[in-house]
Image (spheres, rainbow, N blue to C red):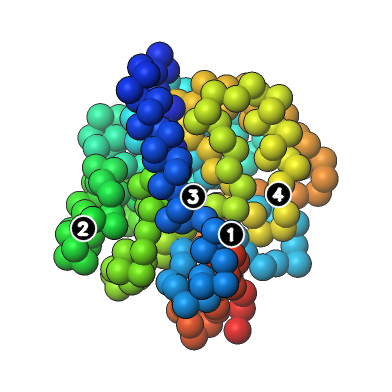
Amino acid sequence: MGFWVIRRRTIGVLACAAAALAMFWTVSSPAVVGASATQRQLPIYSVQTDYKQLSISFDAAWGNEDTEQLIDILGRYQVKATFFVVGEWVDKYPQSVAALHQAGHEIMSHSNDHAHFNSLSTQQIIDDLNACNDKIEAVTGVRPTLFRCPYGEYDDHVVNAVRSIGMEPIQWDVDSLDWKDLPASEIAQRVTGKVQPGSIVLFHNAALHTPEALPSILETLLGQGYTFVPISDLILPGTYGQDYTLDHTGRQIPN
């Protein structure tokens, strides 16, 4: 998950969020990594495509205030999204996971307990992924194939561990910043002004103004001729390094 929203934050939580933000830019932004990214293992941030397709995604780790509302809004516009959920969130809200699946959205892994994966061993990463996948599969009957790193943190050993069990790590190239409690109009302007064909957009469930911003975003992009597909339908099939490569921004490019 990129960042999360907890209403009525304390000063301490805000300080932690600021520290996490600094860590995110240092660790996971391709723009910061720059030319050296070509030497690193990267998740998929976006996809090279000639079609006006994009994916919207939601990270779910703590709150559950607006899941039904998000399902209703997405259903109104016949849009299917990808929800990256934490295993502990599945434990707390299995009915919401089932409702998302029944509405046609894909449910993918966001780790079992939102740990800092850079600090875990390869085996600990694999065990964590399997624990979360087991929980999702028990509710939906479908085993996840995609993974989003908690806090957006990764390094080579994280990416390699994820791919070693046949999963694909997914980031984003458009951050709604809804976790900052931005006004709905600002969230909408930010997203619609940054997307391009092949974009992956990051939202969060339980973000304060996301349900208010989402209809405007969907209407604007649909009006521009975009179609929305789950991430598994957006990304290129095959094996990394064989069927596709990633450029220094994490954009997936067919070989």
Residue at image x 43%, y 34%? 18
**Label 3, label 1: how many angstroms apart (C-alpha)?**
9 Å
Q: Nearer the viewer, mark 2 or mark 4?
A: 2
Residue at image x 72%, y 29%? 216
Of 42 and 168, nearer the camera is 42
Q: Nearer the viewer, mark 1 or mark 4?
A: 1
Q: Which residue is mark 1?
A: 31
Label 1 sits on what residue type? Ala
Extreme-top residue of the structure: 8
Q: Residues within 10 Å of mark 3 (few under 14, many from 20)?
A: some
Q: Disc number at residue 25?
A: 3
Q: Nearer the viewer, mark 2 or mark 1?
A: 1
Upstream in sequence: badge 2 or badge 1: 1
Q: Which residue is mark 4?
A: 195
Residue at image x 30%, y 69%? 157
- Left or right: where 49 falls relative to 200: right
